[in-house]
Amino acid sequence: MSSNHPSRLIKDVTCPFCSLLCDDLSVKNEANKLSVTAHGCARAIRNFERHEPTVAAAIHGERVSIDAAIKHAASILSRAKQALFAGSSTDVAGSRELMALAEKSGAIIDHVHGDGMMNNTLVLQNRGWIMTTLTELKNRADLIIFIGTDAVSHYPRFFERFIWNQSSLAGLKKNARDIVYIGDELNTRAGIHPGGRRPAHIKCTKKEMNETIAIIRALLNDTRIQSDNIRPRKLSSLKKLVERIRSAQYGVIIWDAGEFAPTDGDIIIQSICDLVKELNQHSRFSGLSLGGNNGGTSFMNVCAWQSGFPLRVSYHENRIDYDPHTFSTKNILHEKAADALLWLSSFDTSLAVPRTALPTIVLSRPAKRPAHEAEVYIPLGTPGIDHSGNLLRTDNVVSLPLKKLREIDLYEGSAILRRIRQAM
Ligand code: SF4
């Protein structure tokens, strides 16, 4: 075994397990077993070093050849009057093939993080926004305000990579940033300055979020505030924040659309974006939206390139329809508006296949109990471990290459999707 697979250290590996796409990992391959030797967070280590269970393609839980599984999947989609494609977690090549298969099947297509991405898209479409990139954040931001997110819960190396101890191309002193959190149930430990200074934390529930942003805007505009309903301590913290905002050279407000409810997330994001626009009348401020894990940013972009619309779309009756509310996975399943489901999940084995009695095709990274709900199950390799590929980073401006790190008998998602389409 070891003579066939000599030990090697692979440097500058891109990690696909959150949308930060850290590209500085070192991974050792010894006898085809991977270990992260530098720069991996706990999530990266867990995923790169995971021992993939041996599972085969199956129909109704019975092991079959890959050809038989592909043929059966194609027959389900050919028979379906309205298929639903959900999960949609894959790389750029997989996303392109999934869109092509959706077009051929007349399917509705959504992503596992469709709710959050939709909240952002609605705001961008309706009013526009002023946004920055992770690189600008790292090099210029002297005031960073997190609204409703702590970043690290979903993007573990966020502070390590972009906030603390970073040398700046724009002359910003190391660790000279002020950090402010607005929200509750946030992990604020990462926001403690390396010298020990604690971040400011203005507590407010998700329900109070919009009102809190409105108070900041009112204070900035010197509007008189009726303070009976606002806790004095909170008002005093908001006044301090407004003073700091006024002195900022380059402020950034960060949110994660997936952490707001689908019902009013777009309204909160709209308020944040309006605040950013107002701040730009006198100083320099930008927004930065985090999100797009599980290949979400890539899938959203590919959907726009190939269909002309962002998520969510339908190819029913050879026509493209865009409707981000109606075409949600939850809504389509609740309304019983589909008669077949294709679930695609290439990265995160904890994502659950929706519970449904529909004929279901599951294409996923191998799991110990291989998708017992599936009529057809095909195990897939992981982009960035089992095959090369590309993903787009959360800030939408950089596409990172993924490397193949080991030899394993698992299929590439884009190839399987292409073969299903060709078999229809
Ligand atoms: S922060 Fe995200 S991209 Fe970076 S190593 Fe951890 S899981 Fe991978």
Image: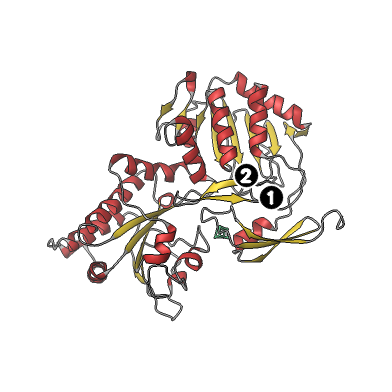
User: 228 or 241, which lies in front?
Assistant: 241
Determine the image quadrant of residue 136: bottom left
User: 402 or 341, which lies in front?
Assistant: 402
Q: Give the label on residue 346, or none.
A: 2
Residue 196 coordinates in the image, percent (x, y): 43, 80
Q: Is residue 414 above or below residue 169?
A: above
Residue 396 coordinates in the image, percent (x, y): 45, 48
Horizontal placement of 412 versus 86: left or right? right
Horizontal placement of 267 versus 79: left or right? left
Residue 389 coordinates in the image, percent (x, y): 62, 45
Disc 1 secondary structure class: loop
Residue at the limit of the structure toward the left, as seen here: 224
Residue in the picture at 58% in, 42% down: 90
Task: Please state, as top left, top right, bottom left or bottom right, where the C terminus lies in the image.
Answer: top right
Q: Is mark 1 within 8 Å of ligand 1?
A: no
> Disc 1 residue type?
Lys
Determine the image quadrant of residue 122: top left
Name the front one of labels 2 and 1.
Answer: 1
Disc 2 secondary structure class: loop
> Disc 2 residue type?
Ser
Residue 354 shows in this picture: no
Residue position for label 1: 404
Task: Please state, as top left, top right, bottom left or bottom right, where the N terminus lies in the image.
Answer: bottom right
Q: How is the image coloured?
A: secondary structure
Residue 410 coordinates in the image, percent (x, y): 73, 42
Residue 177 shows in this picture: yes
User: 43 or 371, which lies in front?
Assistant: 43
Kindly report the distance in space between the C-alpha atoms of the residues bearing marks 2 and 1.
Answer: 14 Å
For label 1, the crowd category at 10 Å Cα-Cα, with few meaning under 14, some 14 to 19 and many 20 or more, is: some
* Earlier residue among tags 2 and 1: 2
Quadrant holding ligand 1? bottom right
